[in-house]
Image (cartoon, grey):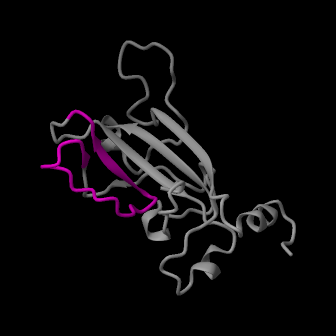
Amino acid sequence: MVERGQHRVDDLPAVVNSLRADVARPPASASGLLKSIDDTCNTYEGEQIPAIQALPIDITGDCEPEFLMQVYRTSAPNEAADSAGQPTYRPLNFDVGVRVYSVRAEDNLGSLSAEPASLQFTTGEGNQRERPLAVISSDFKWSDQSGALCNYQVNGGRACN
């Protein structure tokens, strides 16, 4: 989406102040939507999900979720001021975080951990009822725009002239 320049603020994940686990808290609830490979039960159309919610994901096509996915991002420098009154505003750089939990963690929403589940062998379910199976964070830079260099300077703590 960013590569194609189709990343309007409303289409991006919900904003948090930081990707740190103590700021971007684990999900407290599941959204009422389902992302499924089966179009007959897919109710998720790409809308923004609150950062404190997880999106149920069906990868088998049986219309039952196997995973819960939490997605969030930081805002770009000056995003609030730059986007005011600009419905087509597209941020130049931001960080994104994703946590993927087993659907078995659904009963523990509101008390989940942000620390990834252990990769060690176990005889049971391990800690997948409390911890994410995967945690990913990445920075996104839309660098083919004239304002990108200025944003890099601002992120580095320098003034942009």
Q: Give residue 107's position: percent from left, percent from top.
A: 30, 43
In the image shown, does 150 or 65 lie closer to the viewer? 150
Q: Give residue 103's position: percent from left, percent from top.
A: 31, 38
* 46 part of magenta stretch: yes
Residue stretch rendered in magenta on the structure: 35-60
In the image shown, does 49 or 143 lie closer to the viewer? 143
Residue 150 horizontal side relative to residue 85, left or right: right
Residue 61 horizontal side relative to residue 54, left or right: left
Where is residue 145, by image quadrant?
Answer: bottom right
From the viewer's perspective, is residue 105 above or below residue 48?
A: above
In the image shown, does 7 or 112 lie closer to the viewer? 7
Most common secondary structure along the magenta stretch: loop
From the viewer's perspective, is residue 10 above or below residue 115?
A: below
Please, which residue is most extreme toward the bottom here?
85
Q: Give residue 90's position: percent from left, percent from top.
A: 55, 69
From the viewer's perspective, is residue 79 above or below residue 59?
A: below
User: Residue drawn 67% across and 58% down?
Assistant: 143
* 156 part of magenta stretch: no
User: Residue drawn 27% across and 56% down?
Assistant: 44
Q: Give residue 32's position: percent from left, percent from top.
A: 25, 58
